[in-house]
Image (cartoon, rainbow, N blue to C red):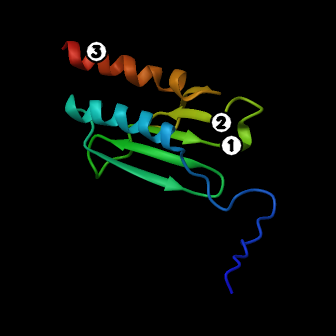
Amino acid sequence: MGSVTPFPQVGRPSQIGFERLELNRILDLYGRMVAAGHWRDYAMDLGRDAAVFAAFRRAAERPEFRIEKRPALRNKQGMWALIGEHGAVIKRGHELGPVLAPVERRLMKLVED
């Protein structure tokens, strides 16, 4: 009694997730888009291959943007991807900040109008 035996993990983790700093950055952007009146809902999917944050204009629609984290692509084209409403990859990269830049620019246009 008193000893803890961890579950064995073979190869990779069973679920991919966002780290605290990554999620803070994403939720900060989401909050600013909500304050601008553009986004109204979000969803997260934490799966075996990817963690996905989807932002919606309305809950009944397709997500306007999906932010995907795929660690398997870390050494190739980058583990972060910004995917548009119709499934086209808008931006891909190794760091989250530059991948979120197109949405940040759109936010600036929304605030100026």
Is 15 displayed left or right of 21 in the figure? right
> Which sits earlier in the primary sequence, circle 1 or circle 3?
1
Task: Pick whichever, 95 or 48, lies toward us.
Answer: 95
Label 1 secondary element = helix
Where residue 36 appears, as percent x and y from the top left, is: 21, 28
Specify few, some or many for label 2: CA neighbours under 10 Å numbering under 14, 14-19, or 20 or more: some
* Residue with the mark numbered 1: 71
Task: Pick whichever, 113 or 72, lies toward us.
Answer: 72
User: Quarter of the image containing the C terminus?
Assistant: top left
Q: Residue at x 73, y 76 (%)?
A: 5
> Which sits earlier in the primary sequence, circle 1 or circle 2?
1
Label 3 secondary element = helix
Q: Amino acid at mark 1?
A: Pro
Q: Amino acid at mark 2?
A: Met
* Residue with the mark numbered 2: 79
* Residue with the mark numbered 3: 109
Q: Amino acid at mark 3?
A: Lys
Q: Are marks 1 and 3 in contact (CB under 8 Å)?
A: no
Which residue is at the far top? 112
Where residue 59 appears, as percent x and y from the top left, is: 28, 51
Where residue 22 appears, as percent x and y from the top left, is: 50, 37
C-alpha distance separating marks 1 and 3? 32 Å
